[in-house]
Image (spheres, rainbow, N blue to C red):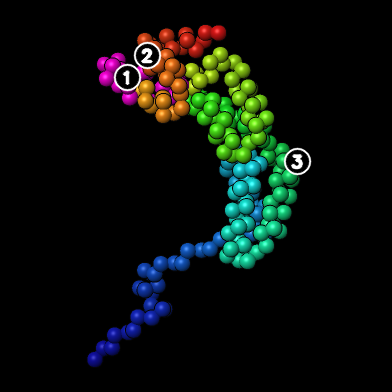
């Protein structure tokens, strides 16, 4: 008589189907934080405060799971922030200017750009300077941003002519949800043609 082999922890079938335990957070050593910071900076443009938040989340998780000293971790984070600022890897003014320009080109109104930069921990002075630089050659920044969003979303004069009338209210609502005031939204959505909208943008 053939005996069935008991299924134990070393059984290949069971081992194959077993779920692995999720790995916990890594211990936040000084070298680990430095490597994490450089990896983040290689992938994303960011502000000093946002990088600080990213690293401090690692410090806090490490303190919870490994019992590491959060104050020591915070000191390492501050040292890294200052080191990368001196090296030019962190430059809040340059980050703010680049980010502001990108957001405006993608169709974000000025107040939305300001809010997003504030969320990233950029200071008021850097935000003001960035917005001034990003809109220096744009007479009506919100109108230009609304037109950019209309182009991306095929709204108003960018929509199919036979659909414009029935879509008017929805298109206005789309711009309103994006943060544009009603007057700006109307000027974009009710522009007769793309050329008319372009002429409005070029007016000084």
- Whether pointer 2 and pointer 1 mark residues with C-beta atoms closer than 8 Å, the reply is yes
Task: Answer left or right for 142 relative to 73.
Answer: left
Q: Mark 3: give few (<14), some (14-19) or many (20+) Cα within 10 Å.
A: few
Q: Quadrant of the N terminus?
A: bottom left
Asked if residue 94 can be seen in this view, the reply is no
Determine which residue is flagged by label 1. Answer: 168
Whichever of callouts 2 and 1 sits on the residue coming sooner in the sequence is 1
- Determine whether the residue tagged by mark 2 lies in a helix, strand or loop: loop
x and y, in percent, of residue 164 in the image: 30, 17
Task: Report the disc number at residue 190.
Answer: 2
The span picked out in magenta is 146-170
Total marks in image: 3
Whichever of callouts 3 and 1 sits on the residue coming sooner in the sequence is 3
Q: Main secondary structure of the magenta part?
A: helix
Tell me what residue is drawn at x 61 percent, y 43 percent: 50
> Compared to 195, does 17 lie above or below?
below
Determine which residue is flagged by label 3. Answer: 86
- Determine whether the residue tagged by mark 1 lies in a helix, strand or loop: helix
- Determine whether the residue tagged by mark 3 lies in a helix, strand or loop: helix
Tell me what residue is drawn at x 59 percent, y 15 percent: 137
> Compared to 154, does 116 lie above or below?
below
Q: Quadrant of the C terminus?
A: top right
Q: Mark 1: give few (<14), some (14-19) or many (20+) Cα within 10 Å.
A: some
Q: Nearer the viewer, mark 3 or mark 1?
A: 1
Q: Nearer the viewer, residue 131 or 37?
A: 131
Q: Mark 2: give few (<14), some (14-19) or many (20+) Cα within 10 Å.
A: some
Q: What distance separates the C-alpha of mark 2 from that of mark 1? A: 8 Å
Tell me what residue is drawn at x 67 percent, y 62 percent: 69
State yes or no: residue 149 in magenta: yes
Q: Nearer the viewer, residue 89 or 92?
A: 92
């Amino acid at each position: 008589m053939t005996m069935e082999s008991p299924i134990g922890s070393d059984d290949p079938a069971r081992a194959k189907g077993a779920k692995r335990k999720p790995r916990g957070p890594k211990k936040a050593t000084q070298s680990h934080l430095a490597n994490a910071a450089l990896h983040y900076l290689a992938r994303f443009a960011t502000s000093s405060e946002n990088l600080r938040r990213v690293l401090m989340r690692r410090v806090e998780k490490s303190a919870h799971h490994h019992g590491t000293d959060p104050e020591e971790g915070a000191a390492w984070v501050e040292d890294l922030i200052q080191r990368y600022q001196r090296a030019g890897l962190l430059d809040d003014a340059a980050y703010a200017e680049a980010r502001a320009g990108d957001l405006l080109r993608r169709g974000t109104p000025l107040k939305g750009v300001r809010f997003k930069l504030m969320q990233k921990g950029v200071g008021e002075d850097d935000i003001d300077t960035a917005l001034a630089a990003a809109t220096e050659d744009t007479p009506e920044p919100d109108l230009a941003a609304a037109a950019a969003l209309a182009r991306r979303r095929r709204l108003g004069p960018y929509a199919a002519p036979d659909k414009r009338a029935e879509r008017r209210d929805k298109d206005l609502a789309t711009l309103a949800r994006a943060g544009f005031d009603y007057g700006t939204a109307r000027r974009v959505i009710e522009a007769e043609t793309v050329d008319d909208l372009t002429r409005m943008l070029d007016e000084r």
